[in-house]
Amino acid sequence: MAGSFPKLLILMRHAQKTGLPGDTGLSAFGDERARALAEAWPRAMPPLDLIIACRSTAKSSRPVDTVRPLADALNVPIDDRWGTQDYQALARQVISDPDNRDRRILICWRHDTLPQLAASVGAAAPSWPDDLYDQLWLLEQVQEAVLLRIEHQPPRAESQGSGVSRDRAEKEPR
């Protein structure tokens, strides 16, 4: 791992889905989150060199849909060749490619395998709650350890008038 871990590796979950049977895309709030992320990223986060999104399937295009506005705004390509269960192969590629050493890489994935993806690059990670959409996991290598820092996505959306975060208000049905 030494010498090829990215300068910064950011893991995030895709934005909210509608929960409607057969729907593969984002909800209206998920679309809003994706656009807001693209608008806020340049002001609040470091520049990106690469965006990786979990490959679209017949059941879900949400990871790609979430980062498409950001990729377009930053003029950064999306690598979407990895399937949900390919997290170990993705991790090996990300941390072994010497070209990634000085890169800042964002990975948008499905929440149920994000902890395993983080573990595959050497970070201890908590589980990702089913109803949480606004976290970013920032991973950096410090000597031989991979440190994970949790932050909230910019901007943090709040529901109107209730003071309750909409990040947890729109639940994702199983």
Image (cartoon, rainbow, N blue to C red):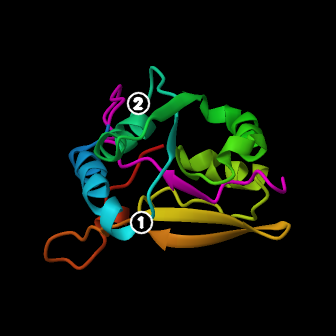
Which residue does the image show at 53% across and 43% down from the upper left? Answer: 110
Q: Secondary structure at mark 2?
A: loop
The x and y percentages for residue 165 are 31, 71
Left or right placement of residue 170 versus residue 129 in this view: left
Query: Would you call the spot at circle 2 few (<14 residues within 10 Å), some (14-19), or many (20 or more)?
Result: some
Q: Is residue 130 above or below residue 159?
A: above
Residue kind at label 2, given as amino acid type: Ser
Which residue does the image show at 52% across and 32% down from the upper left? Answer: 79
Query: Which residues make up the magenta segment?
Result: 1-25
Q: Is residue 81 above or below residue 159?
A: above
The x and y percentages for residue 49 are 50, 47
**Residue 98, magenta (yes or no):** no
In the image, 147 versus 42, the foreground residue is 42
Left or right placement of residue 119 versus residue 6 in this view: right
Residue lying farthest top? 58
Question: What residue would you read off at disc 2?
Answer: 61
**Residue 35 can be seen in this image:** yes
Assign the magenta stretch its main secondary structure: loop
Residue kind at label 1, given as amino acid type: Met
Which residue does the image show at 79% across and 58% down from the upper left? Answer: 122
In the image, 57 versus 170, the foreground residue is 57
Question: What residue would you read off at disc 1?
Answer: 45
Query: Would you call the spot at circle 1 few (<14 residues within 10 Å), some (14-19), or many (20 or more)?
Result: few
Q: Secondary structure at mark 1?
A: loop
- Name which quarter of the figure residue 27 lies in: top left
The x and y percentages for residue 84 are 61, 34
The x and y percentages for residue 174 are 48, 43
Mark 2 and mark 1: span between their CA atoms? 24 Å
**Residue 11, magenta (yes or no):** yes
Q: How many marks?
A: 2
Q: Is residue 155 above or below residue 65?
A: below
Residue lying farthest bottom? 163
